[in-house]
Structures are given as C-alpha cells and as structure tokens.
Amino acid sequence: MSSSYLLQAENISKSFPGVKALDNVQLLIEKGKVHAVMGENGAGKSTLMKILIGMIKPDHGSIMMNGREVTFHSVHDAILAGFSMIHQELLPFPELTVAENIFMGREPVTGFFGWINRKKLYRDAGKLMEKLGVSIKVNRKMKELSIAEMQMVEIAKALSNRAEIIIMDEPTSAISGREVQVLFNIIRDLTKQGIAIIYISHKMDEILEIADTITVMRDGKYIATHPASALNSEYLINLIVGRELNAIFEKRNTNKGEILLSVENLEGEKFSGISFGLRRGEILGIAGLMGAGRTEIMEALFGLRRIASGTVYVKGQKVNIRSPRHAIANGIGLISEDRKHTGLVLSSSVKHNITLASLAKNDGVFLHPDKEKKIADAKIKEFNIKTPSANQVVNFLSGGNQQKVVLAKVLLNDPDIIIFDEPTRGIDIGAKTEIYKMITALAEKGKAVIMISSELPEIIGLSDRVLVVRGGTIVKELKGEECSQELIMQYAMN
C-alpha cells in the first residue's frame, strides 16, 4: 500500500438486514485536496461516511491514516485520529455562545475545582475565527446566527479538534450563492494548510468548481475516481446514474389556457407590489437570491402568511386566503421548501403521510384502513416511490423518495394551481429527473405550476416565463430566448 495518501479506505463492505449498503468500496484521500464523493441517494455515501467517522463499524475492509491502520470504536476515536464531520442538518446548542459550542465538552479549566476559564475559552475561539478569516463574535448566541455562520462555527470546531480530514455533507444546501463563495474561499484556505476535505454534494457546478478529485458510487459499489479537471457534467451524470440523460429537460406542449391565478399589488411581511398572472398549462419560474422574498410570497398565497393588502383571484373569482385550508379549498397546493419540517410527519408511515391532507375528502376525520391502503399503494406506484411497503416510516426513505411522498400527498387533493418551493433540493440527479418529468406532465395536463428554485438550469429548463425577485418585489419578467443564467443573476443582484 502506498503511504502517499492521508487516508486509504479499501474493500469496505457493510450489510444491514436485507440490504448490502457497501460492497468492497475504496476511497483514497490526499493531503490538502478537496475530494468529492458523488452518487444518487442510496448509493452508499452516507454509510461510508458513518464508517469513517466511527458511527458504525464495517463488516470488512481496512482504514489507514498516514500509512497506519486504524480501528474506530466510536466517533471520539475518529476525532482523535483526525476526522471531523459537518453534517447537512446542523445541530447547535442554540442558547449557548459560539465559543461554548466550539469547545463543548473540552472547555479550558482553571483552579482546584476545575472552573471553566472563560477568558481563555473566548480568546481561543476568537483565534480560530481569525484563522478562518470570518468576523463572527464568539460571545454571540448560536440562535442569532445564519445557517452559513453556523457552518463556519462547525468548521472552527473541526479546527479546534486538529482535524486532518473534514467531511462536509451537502454544505451549501441552505445557503445563498454569495455565502457559497465565502465557504469555498475558506475551503481553499484549509487545503493550503494541508487539511483534506471530503465534499458530498449533488450540485454539479459546485463540484466541478471546488473539487480536485471526484469519486463516484452507485448502488453501494465503487464506480470510478477521476481528477475533476478531466470530467464534464454530462460524463459525470453518466457515471452517477449508469446511463445517459440526454434530455433532462424535455420539450413539451406549451399550449396555455385561461388565467387560473391573478395577483394584484400583494403586500405582506418581506414583500410588496406583487402582481402577476398564471395560466393553465404554464410553468412560471420564480428566481432570486435567498432572502429575496420568494418563499414568503408563495407562503402568503397558500395562507401560511398574512396578506396585508392586495387582491388574489382564482379562476376569475376574488378569494380571501386566510389559511392553508382556504388555499386547498380554492385549488392551490404547496410543495414546501423544507420537506422534513413542514412537508412530512417523519415518524409516520408513507401511507399516513400520503393521505393525511385529504381526510376531509374521504370519511371525515377517520379513513377506513383498506381504503387508505388502496389509495397509498396506487400513489406509491404512480410516483415510483421506492419503499418496502406503504407502512414504512417515511424518515427511512431517501431524500428523493421523501419528496415524492410530499408530491403524492399534495396532488391527492387534485389542485389546479401547484406551487413548488425548491422541489429538488438535496436529492440526486436521477430523482431530480423524475421530479422534472412530473412537473412537466402536470403542466401538460392543464395544471398551472409555480416553481421557486435556486438552481438556475432547472428554472431555465422548465419555465415558460421567469419572474426575478429582489428585495421583496418583482424586478423583471424574462421570457423564452432572453432567459439566461447571466441575465437572471444580473437582475437578482443589482
């Protein structure tokens, strides 16, 4: 075995009851490099990372750090060996300060009784922030920070552990384009210090920008490792899904019907002067930076936020939407941005999640078990939801399949106007393609679709028109050929 690698994980295998999650997988990490790991949900990425960080033990295989074989019995062992992981879903202690979060369980102490040396605690935390080049005050409470700032604190925590390898799991899923570039600058500075980054993401453009090396996994198996400079997005997609996706965004029949939704001078918290129309069979894209007010506008239309003034018409009739119940009664459906917190009951079954929002259409408060199962099984088949059964707890499904459950739930009410808020966030390219086909099919069936997305290729690829939102107002409408990533960003930022 070559000792030129900081980490050598070879022939790693892991099985769970009925599932072989990893089958002789390898991962070779160089010092001071960004190594991306890509694959569809269910490819085995998470299982491999859990093994590397000491959360679970492999059935077979070896892990070597700096040429010496290591065995981890706990996360603590992995941290001592030089590993650290920044999870996609950050779990800070919100009422504690930045410094207290960084050194949780490792606070500097003084005196016979071991009192926490707060002066040293804050001084050491400040030095870490200075090393990262970020200006976060270490006496601030975590609950006061943005998601991007919380990530910086997690990176500082990794540095305090003297990490040689930092695993970043979907680190840009909830931050804006500007914050992404700040993160990338920090990653580049970390690699100059010799720290290796294992970077997990579904975002092609980010991977090709930040990664030095890319490893692809599929169905629990190692597929290939290539220098990032030798790959393009088309070939990378082919490696990930095992087939070519020549037409991710399919051409469709763009015949549009009557106006289903009309909004005039809508005003509320974080938005004002919102006016637009939406026709049957149309896909209307909503673009803009995070914090621009996109989600707030759509949540107001679905009754989740108060509309201070303005008028909403559905099928030519003036409506007063005061709650989601009113929105659903008027034929409006919302697939929310945060499926885990607002779209699903994670501890409940696939079956119950699908039928939950449609009880009123069936047998009142209660739904007959046989009828519920029949409905759920039909939707599982229609939406190609990969689950062992309708009784599977939805938390155990992949991100893409969870999103399909949300779609099935919302569409069970058969709304005429469907709002998608970041419909493909955090799901793999294969599941994304299925979601795109579903959105296109809905428009072809005469549904009116609104789609918010931070991924400009999907906004451009799917939308008939794009409204650019900045500072809580619509600053530009773009159609057809004039719609480009550059133009959208120009209006979104200036």
Image (tube, helix red, strand yellow):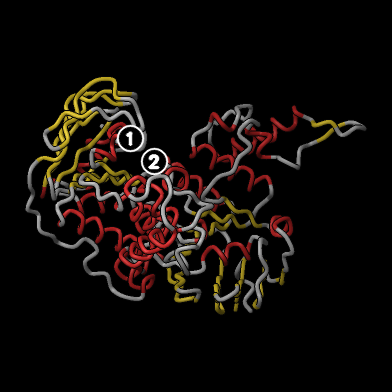
Which residue is located at x 48 percent, y 49 percent? 345
Compare residues 461 and 299 and report the one nearer the observer: 299
Q: Is residue 424 above or below residue 226?
A: above
Residue 177 in the figure: left or right of residue 26: left
What number of labels is visible?
Answer: 2
The answer to whether residue 343 is above or below residue 58 is above
In the displayed structure, 98 sits above or below 352; it is above
**Distance Cα–Cα, label 2 vs label 1:** 20 Å
- Horizontally, residue 276 falls left or right of residue 357, namely left
Residue 304: x %, y % from top left: 36, 33
Quadrant of residue 475 within the rendered picture: top left
From the image, tell me which residue sits under label 1.
299
SS class, disc 2: loop
Q: Is residue 179 left or right of residue 157?
A: left
Residue with the mark numbered 2: 176
Asked whether the viewer can see residue 362, the reply is: yes
The percent position of residue 179, horizontal first and vertical second, equals 42, 40
Disc 2 versus disc 1: nearer the observer: 1
> Upstream in the sequence, badge 2 or badge 1?
2
Instruction: Tell me if mark 1 has few (under 14), some (14-19) or many (20+) residues whose alpha carbon lies within 10 angstroms of its own.
Output: some
Quadrant containing the C terminus is: top left
User: Residue 478: x and y, percent?
Assistant: 14, 41
Q: Residue at x 16, y 56 (%)?
A: 445
